[in-house]
Image: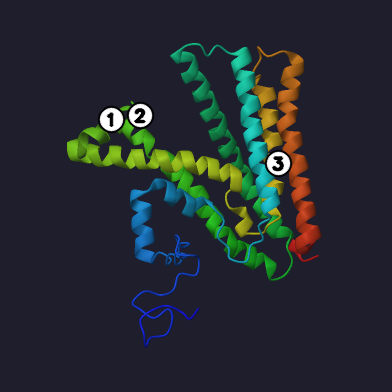
Amino acid sequence: MPPQGHPGHPPGWGPYPPQPYGGGPQPPFPRPPRPPLTRSRRILKCVYNPFYAAQRAFRPSRPDAVEDLTVRKIQKWRTGLGAAAWLVLVMSYKPVDTAKGVENVAGDKFDQSWISTLVLVCAFPLVVGLFVFAAQGALRGLYLRRSLKSCGAVAALVGSMATLPLALAPDPGTAGFRAAIGTPGMVVLITLCAWSLGFALYGIALCLTHVFRTADIHEVLPPILAALLVWVMAALDVIDNENAEVPVLARVVFLLGGPVSVTVLSCWELYRLRRYHQLSVRQALGR
């Protein structure tokens, strides 16, 4: 049978193109990628979004840095399991049946995270200084220049936490400062404190995950610093007699489980960096 249609026109002619899938719904066209934010827009977004500002401040950004996705996934699982184990320990041996108990538990967890960050702040210059000093030749200058971003992350976190006492500290000097700035100044101060609180809380989590973006200096530094941090925190728990009401066996498992797992993961990360990316401590030091 000859093709049907208006005489004198070829098949498929008309204002609508032929439907290749039987006239049904068509697959959506892929959206074009979003253009990167300009410098002014990034600054503006940091002003009104403290979480975006924390990402910019505490996540590594060196373009040629090696990132092993397998290790990142294992680290997330390790963090989740560690938090779950801590929650089980607290729920089993500490009273959390009232709002006051929940507040105490949350406060203990925040204090622990903040102390871990402070320990990391103290260990950071020592470990980085030894690493830079042990490097040979031009690598010293290169690592010193790269360490500026990590030092900036440390300063940003400490500075954000320093704004909170201005609004909350009861000492006469701070109270006099609040009285001097008046109501308009207090509105600005409270807004700044709210921004700083979101920045600092998210920043602490990012600092513990990315170890103050020391991957910007070299990829072998984060696992070394992470292993050092957990053992120092375990020693502090023993000295401070934390979780004294927990049975000895459970306490030993709780104290050693985190450091051992983090150390094993750090060694495995160093192994993968050497095996698959040809990055080792000796190579990083130029030896």
Visible residue check, residue 279: no
* Foreground label between 3 and 2: 3
Task: Please tell me which residue is depicted at 70% across the width and 41% down the height of the picture.
Answer: 228
Q: Which mark is residue 228?
A: 3
Q: Relative to 9, is 259 on the left or the right?
A: right
**Is disc 1 surrounded by few (<14), some (14 to 19) or many (20+) residues within 10 Å?**
some
Mark 1 or mark 2: whose residue is earlier in sequence: 2
Task: Please tell me which residue is depicted at 68% across the width and 57% down the height of the picture.
Answer: 219
Residue at the bottom extreme of this rendering:
8
Residue at the front extreme of this rendering:
1
Report the quarter where the C terminus lies: bottom right
Q: Amino acid at mark 3?
A: Leu
Q: Amino acid at mark 2?
A: Ala
Q: Relative to 177, is 8 on the left or the right?
A: right
Gap between marks 1 and 3 measured at Cα: 40 Å
Helix, strand, or loop for circle 1? helix
Image position, residue 263 (x, y; %): 75, 40
Image position, residue 260 (x, y; %): 76, 35
Q: Amino acid at mark 1?
A: Ala
Q: Relative to 149, is 44 on the left or the right?
A: left
* Residue wearing tag 2: 169
Q: Count the numbered circles shown.
A: 3
Mark 1 or mark 3: whose residue is earlier in sequence: 1
Image position, residue 281 (x, y; %): 77, 57
Mark 3 or mark 2: whose residue is earlier in sequence: 2
Q: Are marks 1 and 2 in contact (CB under 8 Å)?
A: yes
* Residue wearing tag 1: 175
Gap between marks 1 and 2 measured at Cα: 7 Å
